[in-house]
Image: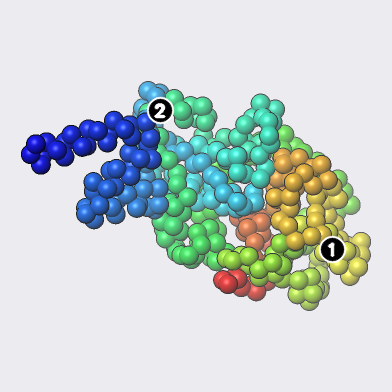
Amino acid sequence: MNRFLFKEKTRTLIDGAISNSKALLCLRRLLWKWRDNDYLEAVLKVGYDPNTMEIKVFGDDNLEKNIYFIKVSGTMGLAGYLRHTLHALFEAEKLGFTPVVYYTDECPCKESADLDGISNPFEYYFKPVSALSVRDVYRSGRVFLFNPHHLRRIERELGNLNPDLPAGYNIEDEYMEKMSFLVKKYIHLNDRVERDMKNNRGELFQHVNNMEQVLGIHIRGTDYALHWKNHPNIVTPQDYFPVVDEALSQGFSYLFLATDDKRYIDCFENRYGSKVLYYRHTYRSDGACNIAFEKNPEDRSAYNRGLDVLRDMYTLAHSGGLIAGLSQVSIIARILCLSMERQYRYIKVLDNGVYRG
C-alpha cells in the first residue's frame, strides 16, 4: 500500500472512531494542522479576539436587521452589569445595529423561577432596549453576538482610559456624556419599578422641600476591605467626615446614605444624627462578603437585592450633591444624573487608588 492510500485509510478509520466526540474531532484537526501557524493563531483567537464578531443564523425572521445580541454574564454586581451593557450599546449605536439585552443566570439578581412571566433579569427592572425580544433573536437570520472580549476594543474607542480593565474606574467628562446619551436613549425603568422608586423616595424625603438640599453619599464596605485585585482600595467613614463637613457648610441639610455595610450607618448616625436618611429595608451586611452574592440574606429575594442597589443609584442621581469613593454604583449614579440633564452642585470623589496586588 502506498503512503497516500495508507494516510487516507488511517484518516478514515480515525474519523469513524471519533465521529461522535466533538472534543476528539477538534484534537484531531489540531494534530493535522500543528505546523500551520496561521491556523493555530486563528484557533487561539476563537472567542477571545476583541476584533472578531460572530454572526449566527437562527431562523429566517428580521433579515432586514442586523441584531446585536448583548448577552451579559460574569461575577459582578448589578452596577457592573449596567456598565458592560452601556459599553455594548455604544458598539451597537456605532454600527447601526438593533440591540437586544439579556442577563444570564450568572446575574446575582436572577431568580430561580420567572418573575411575573419574565426570565430576563434585565427586564425585571428595565423596558427592552428595542422592539425585538430575546425570543425574536432566536428566530432571526442576522444576529451578531456580543462577546465580553469586545469590551477591550470598545474601551479603546471610548478613550482607552482603562486599557487593562475595561469598564474600569478611570472616567472623564466626555465618557460620561457618551454614556448619559445611551441611558437617555435605551435605559428606561419599567412602569412598576419606576412607580415603586418614586413612592419610596416620596416616603423617605417627605419632610424635604427640595432634593437640592440632599447630599448623596455612597460608601462601600464589606468585601472592599479584603483588597480584591483590580478593585478600589477602601475609603473609610473617617476619610469621608472632613469632606462631608465641608459640604454641609455649603447649604445641604440632609445626607442620603447609600451603603452595603451596617456598621457605616451607625458611624454616620453617631456623627450627624437626624440629618442621615437611608432606606431602612435595604439589606446590608456587617461581614466581609459582597452582599450581591450572599445566599438568601434575611430572606431577601435576588430581585429585591437588585432593586435595593438600583434604588440607591437613582436616589443618588436625584440628590443635589455627591460624595463617593471609586465604585461602579457611584459611576452609574453620575451617569444617571447627567441623563436627567442635571448636574450636582457639589461633587467629590475620594480616590485611594485601585489595588493591583
| Residue 346: quarter of image | bottom right
Residue 58's disc number: 2
What residue did someone put label 1 on?
263
Relative to 116, residue 345 above or below: below
Of residue 4 and residue 323, the one placed in the foreground of this image is 4
Amino acid type for the residue under numbered disc 2:
Phe
Q: Give coordinates of residue 329: x percent, y percent.
A: 66, 56
Relative to 25, residue 52 above or below: below
Q: Residue at x 69, y 67 (%)?
A: 226
Q: Is residue 307 visible?
A: no
Considering the numbered disc 2 on the image, is that residue within a helix, a strand or a loop? loop
| Residue 173: quarter of image | bottom right
Of residue 254 and residue 114, the one placed in the foreground of this image is 114
Q: Residue at x 75, y 61 (%)?
A: 288
Q: Give coordinates of residue 65: x percent, y percent.
A: 39, 32
Residue 123 in the figure: left or right of residue 143: right
Q: Give coordinates of residue 188: x percent, y percent.
A: 62, 40
Q: Quadrant of the N terminus?
A: top left
Amino acid type for the residue under numbered disc 1:
Arg
